[in-house]
């Protein structure tokens, strides 16, 4: 999943970006309001984290433009403002949540995860039930256990996609290599390690192995 971050404080920008990338998200970070707005219209994002007081265009004005253009994504404001009128204005304009400075990275991760979950529960997301209590949201290629999203790296997300697409059937290591790594040279060890990482984040029975045949997840 792709997240846009607008934050002009260097320390916050770097720590937020790093924390979200550790969760498996792809993050485009900006410190200028106009540059962030241009990116929002050029690319597809699943969530935007907007500081309010930033150069050239503040977070409120960006949100107005987002809603005017009917861009379909949730918004979390990052702000040190605590005045109730400022909070009310953000919600009236259509933000989904506030993150008030100072905040812990754990709170950041929780709010991002919950906002994405809540937003997509009200969308036309195609949810595919999987084994061991997990479900796959095909619209944004995310994996969920009950009401919590499982954080995946880009390679883990690609692996999951090809397993879900072929669920119920074994797929070969050659097919996994071709889809996940494309033209890059990797060995069987790399594939086994990626399978192990996904099992560690799910359940040891989530991915089934057949020696000499390949891997699958059940329908």
Image: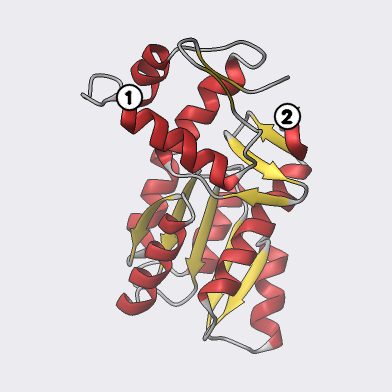
Left or right: 137 as drawn, with respect to 1: right
Label placed on residue 32: none
Does residue 15 sit above or below 182 in this rendering?
Answer: below
For image coordinates 78% across by 43% down, the residue present is 122
Left or right: 44 as drawn, with respect to 81: left
Q: Position of residue 52 (x, y in %)?
A: 49, 74
Image quadrant containing the C terminus: top right
Which numbered disc, 2 or 1, marks the residue that appears first in the sequence?
2
Residue farthest toward the front in the current orientation of the protein: 211
Question: Which residue position is annotated with label 2?
Answer: 130
| Residue 16 in sight in this render | yes
| Residue 124 in sight in this render | no
Does residue 24 sit above or below 207 in this rendering?
Answer: below
Which image quadrant is residue 175 in?
top left
Q: Position of residue 108 (x, y in %)?
A: 56, 70
Tell me the CA gap for discs 2 and 1. 26 Å
Q: Secondary structure at mark 1?
A: helix
For image coordinates 44% across by 65% down, the residue present is 19
For image coordinates 57% across by 47% down, the residue present is 201
At label 2, counting other C-alpha atoms closer than 10 Å, the crowd grade (few under 14, some 14-19, many 20 or more) is some
Q: Closer to the camera, 209 or 84?
A: 209
């Amino acid at each position: 999943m792709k997240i846009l971050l607008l934050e002009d404080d260097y320390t916050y920008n770097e720590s937020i970006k790093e924390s979200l990338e550790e969760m498996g998200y792809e993050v485009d970070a900006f410190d200028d309001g106009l540059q962030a707005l241009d990116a929002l219209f050029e690319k597809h994002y699943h969530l935007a984290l907007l500081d309010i007081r930033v150069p050239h265009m503040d977070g409120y004005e960006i949100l107005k433009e987002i809603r005017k253009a009917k861009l379909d994504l949730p918004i979390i404001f990052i702000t040190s403002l605590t005045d109730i009128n400022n909070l009310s204005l953000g919600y009236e304009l259509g933000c989904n949540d506030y993150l008030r400075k100072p905040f812990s990275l754990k709170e950041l991760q929780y709010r991002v995860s919950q906002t994405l979950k809540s937003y997509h529960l009200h969308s036309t997301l195609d949810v595919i039930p999987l084994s061991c209590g997990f479900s796959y949201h095909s619209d944004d290629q995310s994996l969920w256990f009950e009401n919590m999203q499982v954080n995946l790296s880009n390679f883990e997300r690609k692996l999951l996609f090809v397993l879900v697409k072929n669920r119920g059937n074994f797929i070969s290591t050659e097919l996994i290599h071709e889809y996940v790594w494309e033209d890059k040279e990797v060995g069987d060890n790399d594939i086994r390690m990626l399978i192990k990482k996904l099992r560690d984040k799910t359940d040891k029975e989530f991915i089934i192995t057949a020696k000499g045949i390949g891997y699958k997840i059940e329908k």
